[in-house]
Structures are given as C-alpha cells and as structure tokens.
Image: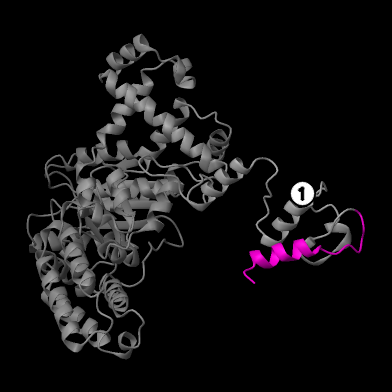
C-alpha cells in the first residue's frame, strides 16, 4: 500500500540510526524527535497534531522507561508506536446497530470524496456479514449520481431505493424518509443513505445534510473524506462537525496517497474515530480501520492479523485440508494449483498482502516491479490445457506445449517455465508436508534439517568407509565396548539389558560380567584420561 510510504521510510531511517547506540543521551532523543517532526510535517499532518505527538514522544523517551531498557532503540520505537495508535484513535470503533431495525447509516462529505462508491463497498461488506442492506439514492444534485448508485448496488448484489431520477429533480429529505418505510416493509435491517456533496463547504450543503439527519435520525453518520486532500482534511472535517456532526470517519482513496496526513490528523482534531478505510478501486478493497494495525504498518512492523483475516475469508478450511493431503501423497496437480491461485486472487492485491509483512519496506523495489498480471497469464496457460494434461503434466510434449502457448497468448518458454516451477514447488511442499526441510534452489543443504551437511555428512561417509561392522553409537565408551565385543566374536550389547552394568557393557550371557582390562584402557584413552 502506497499510503504512509514517505512517512514510513523517514521513520525507519531515523530508528536505524539509534540501533547502534547502547544508551541514548538527551541529544540523541532531541535529534530523533526533530526527525520525527520533519517526517510528520512532510506527510501533511496538521501542525497541532505534530506538536502534541512530538512532545509526548520526547517526554517518554527521556523518562526512565528508556534509560532502564536493555535496548533503548526498541523502546523508542515502542513509544512512537503507542503514540501513533493514540492519534489514530486508540481503540477500534465498530458500527452501532439499532435495537429495533432498520439501522440507519448516513454518509456525508464533499463531492468527489467517493461517497457513492463507498456506499456500495459498505453494503457489500455488511451483506457478507449477514445483513440485508438497502442503498438509498438521496444525492439528487450531482449529474447521474442516482444511476451510478444503481450500478454500484448491482455490482455489490444489494437492493437500491431510487424513486427520483435525480439530476436536480426530487426532494432528498422525502426520499430518505420514504426509504425507511420501504426498508421496514421489505425487511432490510440496514439503510445506507447516500447524500449530496459540493465542491466546497457551503451553507446549502450543510442545511440539506442537517435536514436529512433530522428527518431520519440516523444511528451512525459517517463522514467520508478523501485521504489525498492533505491539510484541507482538517478544515473540511471541522466544518462538517460544526454543521452536521458525525459519529465516525471513513477514509477513501487511502491507497492513492504516499503521505497519509489526513488519517493522522482527522481523528485527533475532531475526536471522532476512523471506522473504515477504502484501499482500492474494487468493491472488496474496503476494511475496518484498526489504529494499532495501521501504526504497525507505518513503522514497517507488518500487519499479520489483517493478512490472516483476509486468508480466512478467501480460503475454505476443508479445501485447505484436502490440499495438504494431496501434497503429502504427491497427488497435487496443476488443476489444484489453479484453484489455489484463484483463491489467492480473491484475497485482493498481492502487492497489498506482501506489504503487510514485517520489513516489507526493504522489498520496495521488488514490490514495485511485481506484475500482478503474471497471475492472469499463469491462469490462462493452465486453462488452455486439457483436464488430462493438468492432472498429468508429463503428457506435455513439444506439440502440446506449442498448442497451449498459442491458446493462452504466451510463448512456449513461458509454458516450460510454469511447468518447471510447478514441479519444484510440488517437491518442496511434499517435503514440508512430511515434516522435512526443503532444499531451496540456490542454497546448499541445511545442516541438521534432514538434508545432511557438515559433520553429519562426514560421519556418514566415515561409517561407509569403515563398513557394516562399525559401531553407530554416539557414546564413546559404549562404542569402544561394542567394537571390542565384535573383536571377540560376541554380539555387541547382548548382555547390556540383562546385566545393567555401567555404560551398558558386558559380554556373553553372564549377568555379573565386568569389562576387561583392555576395555577399560580403551575407554580411558577415549575419555582423555
């Protein structure tokens, strides 16, 4: 995600300079706070927020919690993380649903902030959560706003209430009140009212929004703000708070701004929580806003919890179990691979998911160069194969590969590369499924991981040279006794279990047998005595 890219890079560079210091002096703290202030101002964060934030960080960084810490640099990162969570709103705030349905959610904001598209995203998210939302076309000012909402509703698979054509025709207050009656009769438990916006804050906009709020008495009023407008976010948010008031904030176009100043300013300035964030153009690019997770993303600490939640939504548990069994039994096919890849695409942007991993900023160049269309090409190649070819790639001779390349609009080289990578991946996953450690291409075998290496390989080679008769015991005393027993024509350790003698030594079947003088001399020599 491009959001906070500039801020994250600056903060990461600032903290890396602290890692070499065993103890932080007041000068080190002041220098760090100064860099943080510059980074926040460059990210378009409002000046009052910057002042409060840096003052809190400096006070805590000069306190005992850093001076007594084993790793002062990590403690400073933790302090900055805590303060970021605070200015982002602290705790996550969920939607408050009405005790007696329908729950009314009113959207407000300037024209161009993305209210209509966001209405569809919110409706689809609520539908996936088991609700039956109804979209209400109360924006009767903007040209074709009603038609746009109808299209969005169809894409989201939800109902829409649009009795007026719009384009300046109709009374938005009457539409909103009629929508509540319609929702009750048609058993919709959530009503989302899309209101009109203006290019700027004006009295007419505020009056219309206030009239709709008074008429429908919404349970939630969500202020939709364009995350790309920077410092203007604070002015706009204050104007709406005074004119209409709102219960929560929704950030739209969060993926389009590398600075993210609006997100870091609006919650702190208005005292209203950020509840949702729109992170892309698709209707699925929408997520609840978690201040702690967003702070972790800013500091390049990753967001594993969101990644897990996305995976749980996209992947079926039963399918995952069957796939694991196929890996273990070496029956994983290209058909299964295609299904897994399609589920991966359902999770959303691959770049976005990789960006949630800790340390992702260090892979910025690789992420920027990653072409998500590669998945589409791979999917086309597999779909150009026959069912038999997907189940048994060994059937793919030269003529078949040429046919597949032509059918998928790719080259034979790309088909060959896919088959080779599939074979390598299948072998690695089979090894992992059986509890082993796969050998990664370009790397040697890892010692102690079943692949053999170092001293283990040397011992195996030595054992082969010494032949079958060599002792395999790791106990020097026991090994010496076994070799001495073989020299005498006896079975090594035959009496060990019966006699219980020291080191498991003994010979023949005599229960009280003791080691010979030669045995003891050998043992002492091995033990360095």
- On screen, residue 63 versus residue 181, left or right, reads left
- On screen, residue 43 versus residue 137, left or right, reads left
Residue 5: horizontal and vertical position, in percent? 18, 58
Q: Residue at x 37, y 50 (%)?
A: 181
As for residue 114 lying within the magenta part, the answer is no
Residue situated in front as seen by the camera: 178 or 16: 16
As for residue 524 lying within the magenta part, the answer is yes
Residue 364: horizontal and vertical position, in percent? 21, 51
Residue furthest top in the image: 399
- On screen, residue 59 versus residue 460, left or right, reads left
Q: Residue at x 18, y 83 (%)?
A: 28
Dot 1, how many residues are within 10 Å of its Cα: few (below 14), some (14-19), or many (20+)?
Answer: few
Quarter of the figure with the C terminus: bottom right
| Vertical relation: 59 (above or below) 302 | below
List the residue tagged with mark 1.
487
**In the image, which residues are magenta?**
509-529
Instruction: Examine the rendering and report whether any part of residue 471 can be seen.
Output: yes
Instruction: Examine the rendering and report whether any part of residue 132 can be seen.
Output: no
Residue situated in front as seen by the camera: 118 or 55: 55
Q: Residue at x 26, y 40 (%)?
A: 152
Residue 1: horizontal and vertical position, in percent? 24, 52
Which secondary structure, mark 1? helix
Residue furthest bottom in the image: 64
Residue situated in front as seen by the camera: 62 or 398: 398
Q: Quadrant of residue 375?
A: top left
Residue 453: horizontal and vertical position, in percent? 48, 48
- On screen, residue 448 versus residue 376, left or right, reads right
């Amino acid at each position: 995600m491009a959001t906070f890219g500039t801020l994250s890079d600056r903060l990461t560079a600032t903290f890396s300079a602290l890692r070499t210091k065993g103890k932080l002096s007041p000068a080190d703290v002041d220098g760090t706070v100064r860099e943080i202030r510059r980074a926040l101002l460059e990210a378009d964060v409002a000046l009052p927020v910057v002042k409060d934030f840096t003052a809190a960080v400096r006070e805590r960084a000069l306190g005992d919690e850093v001076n007594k810490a084993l790793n002062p640099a990590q403690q400073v990162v933790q302090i900055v993380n805590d303060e970021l969570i605070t200015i982002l709103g602290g705790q996550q705030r969920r939607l408050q649903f009405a005790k007696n349905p329908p729950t009314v959610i009113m959207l407000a904001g300037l024209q161009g902030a993305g209210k209509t598209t966001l209405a569809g995203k919110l409706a689809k998210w609520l539908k996936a959560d088991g609700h039956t939302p109804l979209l209400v076309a109360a924006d009767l000012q903007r040209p074709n706003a009603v038609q746009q909402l109808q299209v969005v509703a169809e894409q989201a698979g939800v109902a829409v209430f649009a009795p007026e054509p719009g384009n300046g025709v109709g009374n938005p207050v009457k539409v909103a009140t009629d929508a509540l009656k319609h929702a009750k009769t048609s058993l919709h438990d959530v009503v989302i009212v899309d209101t009109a916006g203006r290019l700027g804050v004006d009295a007419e906009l505020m009056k219309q929004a206030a009239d709709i709020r008074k008429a429908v008495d919404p349970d939630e009023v969500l202020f939709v703000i364009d995350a790309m407008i920077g410092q203007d976010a604070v002015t706009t948010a204050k104007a709406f708070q005074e004119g209409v008031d709102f219960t929560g904030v929704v950030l739209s176009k969060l993926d389009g701004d590398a600075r993210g100043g609006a997100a870091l300013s609006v919650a702190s300035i208005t005292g209203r929580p950020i509840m949702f964030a729109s992170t892309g153009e698709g209707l699925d690019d929408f997520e609840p806003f978690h201040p702690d997770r967003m702070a972790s993303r800013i500091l390049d600490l990753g967001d594993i919890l969101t990644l897990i939640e996305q995976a749980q939504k996209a992947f079926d548990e039963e399918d995952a179990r069957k796939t694991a069994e196929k890996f273990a039994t070496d029956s994983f096919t290209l058909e299964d691979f295609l299904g897994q890849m399609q589920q991966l695409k359902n999770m959303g942007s691959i770049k976005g998911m990789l960006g949630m991993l800790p340390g992702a900023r260090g892979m910025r160049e690789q992420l920027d160069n990653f072409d998500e269309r590669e998945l589409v090409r791979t999917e086309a190649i597999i779909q150009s194969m026959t069912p038999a070819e997907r189940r048994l790639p060994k059937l793919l001779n030269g003529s078949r590969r040429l046919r597949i390349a032509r059918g998928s609009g790719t080259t034979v080289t790309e088909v060959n590369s896919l088959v080779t990578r599939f074979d390598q991946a299948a072998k690695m996953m089979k090894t992992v499924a059986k509890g082993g450690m796969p050998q990664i291409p370009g790397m040697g075998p890892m010692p102690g991981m079943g692949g053999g290496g170092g001293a283990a390989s040397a011992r195996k080679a030595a054992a082969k040279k010494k032949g079958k008769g060599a002792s395999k015991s790791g106990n020097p005393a026991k090994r010496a006794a076994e070799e001495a027993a073989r020299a005498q024509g006896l079975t090594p350790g035959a009496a060990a279990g019966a006699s219980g003698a020291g080191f498991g030594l003994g010979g023949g079947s005599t229960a009280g047998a003791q080691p010979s003088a030669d045995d003891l001399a050998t043992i002492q020599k091995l033990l360095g005595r």
